[in-house]
Image (spheres, rainbow, N blue to C red):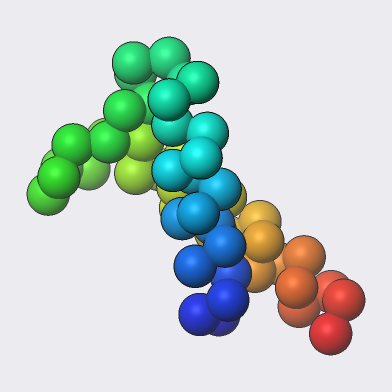
């Protein structure tokens, strides 16, 4: 799970400058950026679980 979270956050922060402003994440806020980050981490977690 830690690997999925670390890789998901890395992917989000690499993609963040190229995303529309609606996906910008503000600290301590539940917003579209946070949900996108969560989705990336969840997708990576499921992919890693399927492989291992």
Task: Identify whether 37 is placed above or below 8.
Answer: above
User: In the image, 22: left or right of 48?
Assistant: left
Task: Identify whether 9 is placed above or below 48.
Answer: above
Q: Quadrant of the N terminus?
A: bottom right
Question: Residue 32 at what x, y percent from top left?
Answer: 35, 32
User: In the image, 9: left or right of 30?
Assistant: right
Question: Residue 39 at what x, y percent from top left?
Answer: 53, 49
Task: Identify whether 51 is placed above or below 27.
Answer: below
Q: Residue at x 46, y 55 (%)?
A: 9
Question: Residue 5 at what x, y percent from top left?
Answer: 49, 67
Residue at the extreme left of the image, as rendered: 28
User: In the image, 13: left or right of 27?
Assistant: right
User: In this rendering, does residue 37 appear at all?
Assistant: yes
Residue at the extreme top of the image, as rendered: 20
Residue at the extreme right of the image, as rendered: 51
User: In this rendering, does residue 32 appear at all?
Assistant: no
Give the total of numbered labels. 0
Question: Residue 33 at what x, y percent from top left?
Answer: 36, 35
Q: Residue at x 56, y 48 (%)?
A: 11
User: In the image, 47: left or right of 26?
Assistant: right
Q: Quadrant of the C terminus?
A: bottom right
Q: Residue at x 47, y 21 (%)?
A: 19
Task: Identify whether 5 is placed above or below 25.
Answer: below
User: In the image shown, does 11 or 33 lie closer to the viewer?
Assistant: 11
């Amino acid at each position: 799970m830690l690997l999925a979270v670390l890789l998901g956050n890395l992917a989000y922060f690499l993609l963040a400058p190229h995303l529309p402003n609606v996906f910008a994440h503000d600290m301590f806020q539940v917003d579209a950026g946070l949900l996108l980050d969560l989705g990336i981490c969840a997708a990576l977690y499921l992919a890693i679980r399927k492989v291992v």
